[in-house]
Image (cartoon, rainbow, N blue to C red):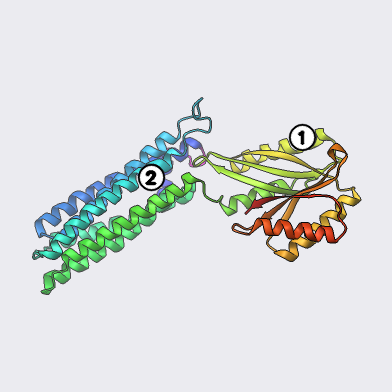
Amino acid sequence: MVSWMLRKLKIDPQTPDGRTGVGSLAGTVGILCNVTLFLLKVTAGLLSGSLAIAADGWNNLSDAAASIGTLLGFQFSRKPADAHHPYGHARAEYLSGLCVAVLILFIGVELAKSSVAKIIAPEPVALTRLTVGILAVSIGMKLWMSLFVGKLGRIIGSKTLEATSADSRNDVIATSAVLGSCLVSAFTELQIDGWAGLAVAVFILFSGYGIARETVSVLLGEQADRELVEKLQQLVLRHEGILGIHDLLVHDYGPGRCFASAHVELSAEEDPLVCHEIIDHMECDALAELNVHLVIHHDPVPVNDAEWGQLRGLVEEIAERIDPRMSIHSLHIDRRHGLKRLVFDLAVPYGMEQEQIREQIAAELTARGVGYPVTVRFDEK
C-alpha cells in the first residue's frame, strides 16, 4: 500500500523534495487518524463515564500534535541555506519534535491530576457495545498506523517517523489495557478506571520524556552513527595511495545535511598536486554516494624515514602495553629551530587519566634512548 500511495502521489523518496513529501504524507495521515480517534474516544468516555477512555483520547490528541510537529518540521527543514544559516534548516525537524514533547508532557501531567482525583472518588463505568467497538477500531487503526509510518520511516531513514511508528505500537498496548480495565469495571465491583487513567497518563509522560531526550541529544551533538562512520572510512581507504585515516568528525545539521572532516595519510614523497586530486575525488564521492559534505586534511607521512619508522613502532608498542584500546596517529619529528621534538596524537577512551599516561610514555621513551622532548596530544574516542 505504501508503494502504491507514493506512486499515486508522485513522491520519489530518493530526492530531497521526495523526503519532504514522505514526511508530509506521514504527518497528514497521523493528524487525520489521531483527531478522529480523539473525537471518538472522548465521546465514548463522556457517555460511559470512563476517565481511562477519555485519557486515551487525549493521548491520541497529543499524537495528533506530534504529527502536526512532524508535518511542520519536514516543511520548514526544506528551506534552503541562507546568510544567517549557511548549513540549512534541516534541524527544524528536531526542534519541532522538542516542542511536541513539551506539549505531550503537559497533557500527561493534567491527565495524572484528573486520574488521582477519580481514584480518590471513584464513579461507576457504563460500558456499551458502542464503547467497546470504538476501542476495538482504535486498536486496529493504531496497528495499521504503526506499520504504515514505520515503513515510510525505513524508506527515508527518518528517526522521527520510526519513533512515531513505535509510539503508535505502544498506543495499541495502552488502548488494550484501557479496554481491559473497562471490562473489569463493568463486570466486577472493582473500580479501577482511575488507576487505568493514571497508567495512561504515566505512559504519556514516559513517551514525552523519551521524545524530549532523543531530540535534545541530537541537538547537543551526539556520537555519529557507527554505520556511517564505517562507510566513510571504507570510502576513503579504497582510493589508491591512502595509508590511513584518523580524526574523522561528523556533524549533523539535520536529516540530509551532514558534514564531516577527516585527516587522511598519504606518502610525504607523493606529488602534492596528485594528493590534491586524490582528496578531491574522495570529497566528491562522499557527497555523491553518502550525501556527506566531507572536508579532508592532507597528512603527509614520511614512510622512507628510518628514524620515523623506528619511533612509530616504539610508541605503538608502548601504547599497546598500557592499554590495547589506545592508538596513535600524526606522529612526526619536529625539527624547527634546530631542535628535535617527537610529536604525536594519542586516541584514548573517554575518562582515562591523561597526565599519568603522558608521564608513563615519556619515561619509557627516555629509558629506550629517545633523548629529546615528547609532546603527546590526546584525542578522546
Q: CA distance from mark 1 to mark 2?
A: 42 Å
* Apparent side of residue 127 relative to residue 101 in the rendered image (left or right): left
* Apparent side of residue 325 relative to residue 313 in the rendered image (left or right): left
* Apparent side of residue 140 relative to residue 210 in the rendered image (left or right): left
Closest to the observer: 47 or 116? 116
Q: Which callout, 1 or 2, points at the residue further toward the start of the chain?
A: 2
User: Mark 2 = which residue?
Assistant: 97
Q: Is residue 371 above or below residue 5?
A: below
Magenta region, mostly helix, strand or loop?
Answer: loop
What residue is at 51 percent from the left and 39 percent from the top? Answer: 253
Q: Is residue 78 above or below residue 171?
A: above
| In the image, farthest residue toward the bottom | 188
| In the image, farthest residue toward the top | 83
Verify whether residue 11 appears in magenta.
yes
User: Mark 1 = which residue?
Assistant: 276
Residue type at tag 1: His
Tell me if residue 152 can be seen. Answer: no
Tell me if residue 69 can be seen. Answer: yes
Magenta-drawn segment: 10-15
Residue type at tag 2: Gly
Q: Quadrant of the C terminus?
A: bottom right
Cβ–Cβ under 8 Å for marks 1 and 2: no
Where residue 202 appears, as percent x and y from the top left, is: 28, 60
What residue is at 71 percent from the left and 46 percent from the top? Answer: 236
What residue is at 16 percent from the left and 59 percent from the top? Answer: 51
